Amino acid sequence: MTAGTPIALLALFALIPLTAYVFWSKRPAIAVLVVGFFAALFGPEGSYFKLPLVPPLDKLTLPYLLLFVFALVRCGPQLKRAKIFRGADLLILLAILGGFLTLATNGDALRYGSWRTIDIPPLVINDGIQLGFQELLLAGFPFILGRALFRSPRDLRDLLHFLVVAGLIQTLFIWVELRMSPQFHTWLYGYGAHSDFLQTIRWGGYRPMVFMAHGLAMALFMLVAFLAVIVLREAGETQIRDRFRIGRVAIYLGVVLVLCKSTGAILYALVLVPLLLRGRPERQVKVAAFLAALVLLYPVLRASDLVPVDALVDQAKSLSPERAQSLEFRFDNEEMLLEKARERFAFGWGGHGRRSVYDDELGKEIAVADGHWIIVLGARGALGFLEAFGLLVIPIFLVRRRFARLRDPAERKGLAGFALIVAICAFDLLPNGLFSNYIYLLAGALMGMAQEIQKRTNTWST
């Protein structure tokens, strides 16, 4: 089974020879970056092909499945040394088990509405298989590849440089869409990446998307690229790929980030850039750990009414009435969905719209899920939330614990800044969805570097 235009499906199939070529012509770590980010930034949204008993293979899952298979062939010893599916990787196996536990607790059909009704079928064995293995493809393989292949200061430097260069390339497309509206996806693949064109209009102009699912996704990636260049600058780098002066690149990416017109991404930058420029690495790691703890505890805080919802909305009104209305809408919908999630808190409701909230009379879906945390909690319960977010925050806690062992100033600044990047990407999953899964690759890379610290007395090997 397939979905998408012929050119979109052809682009997905083209990832197979592309991955083979890149993996055998580049260093494995670089190959993972090239293929993973090329698919995320230029692949077709919403297109996939489906094999029996296998979750849909799209631009997020297919590249990492291919990369993992090629990594087993080319660098099996490296994966063996990394001891995959141990330690934090056990969360991935827990997610696979969780899919079957969700299946076991959702064998009932659901009916909503009285005047008009909607019937939702019970989960079947195929649903349980796909729930578990979807997480292996979406989060597990990127995390494992990042953890196994990114270990040294050289790997971190290459990763940060790659993010900056990828951001610079994206700006070429962003300038066009700022003028002509988000059209690249339609021009190449024959359909828009997002169904609601009104969401591309912000601040009297257009919010670029290029080939990503939403303007928020593009803004977050440009934030990552912008923060990466700041981290490199603080770690002592003076040029990007020996061509561009790093200060000018930072200013340029900062301007483009503002033009992406995402209030959240801009606020993140306003908070984190001064911290990266002025704060000591120890403080940066502490802030990263605080954000990670907040992400992990957010469902509990939200369920206990410890999140100051009204104060946050009032504060947003002072900045923008439009943004305040959007924030209030999200909080109201979160409350409805959280109430539904409580009913099957441990293992969730599964798929097919079972986790959503419906009108008592018309049987119409009335709740909109924006944050990835509430989507995961509703569909896969507390166990699924622990896996999805545990993979993101455990590396940050591990860096915080072992950071004092590092002595080299440049390495300390680089690792602390990178921990902040992973932390803010995880934090963004509270208000927004998981538009792209490269965050798990970054978290895995941070985990690999944190584990490497334990093997060194004063510094990493280069």
Image: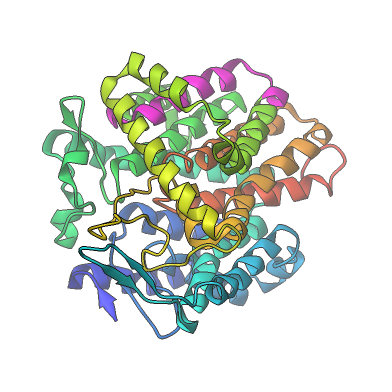
Residue that protrudes farthest toward the bottom in the picture:
52
Residue 238 versus residue 384: which sits nearer the camera? 384
Q: Residue 357, position in %: x, y? A: 36, 54
Is residue 24 found inside the magenta-colored segment of the image?
no
Left or right of 168 in this view: 452: right
Coloring basis for residues:
rainbow
Can you say whether 7 is above or below 456 in the image? below
Residue that protrudes farthest toward the right in the picture:
457
Left or right of 230 in this view: 296: right
Can you say whether 321 is above or below 21 in the image? above
Can you say whether 53 is above or below 19 in the image? below
In terms of secondary structure, what is the magenta stretch mainly?
A: helix
Residue 142 versus residue 112: which sits nearer the camera? 112
Is residue 262 found inside the magenta-colored segment of the image?
yes
Residue 435 versus residue 115: which sits nearer the camera? 115
Q: Residue 309, position in %: x, y? A: 46, 28
In the picture, residue 102 is in which quadrant? bottom right
Left or right of 398 in this view: 24: left
The span shown in magenta is 259-283
Q: Residue 20, position in %: x, y? A: 45, 72
Q: Residue 426, position in %: x, y? A: 53, 42
For residue 259, say whether it is visible. Answer: yes
In the picture, residue 75 is in which quadrant? bottom right
